Amino acid sequence: MPTVEDEAVRDLSRAREASIGVLKDAKLRLKSFLLRHGLNYSGRASWNEATCAIWRRSSADPAQQIVFQESLRAVTEQTERVRRLEDELVKSPPRGGYVRSSTHSRRCAACSTTRP
């Protein structure tokens, strides 16, 4: 039977996985918005400073500018949330004999933490 601590780590892992899904959706919304307005950015990520520069150069309507800024903010906030949850997973020491998510196992291996 898992301990309270094991369940806490599992909850962290579940929260991280859910945040990754929300982040993917936010990125997709931003990319779709840019494509609808003919702003095809060929770089690696369509939510970085280069995209902001492309959008600023365009003749965007003020309402569209707000949508762009909010979409970009959603991506940024979710990216930070995923990073915070990952940091907490790395800090949490493995306990018991229960296997955690593959992500937690990879993170533990990456930071040289012994895992079960």
Image: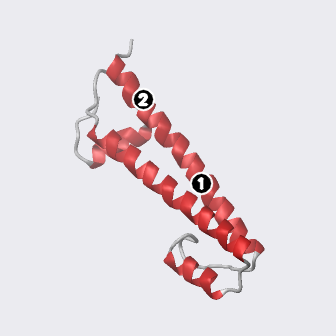
Which of these two is toward me, 45 or 74?
Answer: 74
Q: Amino acid at mark 2?
A: Arg
Is 70 situated above or below 14? below
Which of these two is toward me, 56 or 24?
Answer: 56
- State the separation of the CA atoms marked 2 and 1: 21 Å
Q: Residue 37 location, x and y as percent?
A: 75, 77
Q: Specify whether 18 is left or right of 36.
A: left
Is 70 situated above or below 97? below
Q: Residue 20 location, x and y as percent?
A: 53, 48
Is 69 situated above or below 13? below
- Of the 4 image quadrants, the one containing the C terminus is top left
Residue drawn at x 77%, y 72% is: 36
Q: Residues within 10 Å of mark 2 (few under 14, many from 20)?
A: some
Counting labels gives: 2
Q: Earlier in the sequence, mark 2 or mark 1?
A: 2
Q: Specify whether 14 is left or right of 110.
A: right
In the current view of this chain or complex, which residue is farthest to the right?
36
Residue under numbered circle 1: 24
Does residue 7 show up?
Answer: yes
Which of these two is toward me, 62 or 113?
Answer: 62
Q: Are marks 2 and 1 in contact (CB under 8 Å)?
A: no
Residue under numbered circle 2: 10
Q: Residue 24 location, x and y as percent?
A: 59, 54
Residue drawn at x 32%, y 22% is: 5
Q: Secondary structure at mark 2?
A: helix
Residue drawn at x 51%, y 41% is: 17
Q: In the image, which disc is placed on residue 60?
A: none
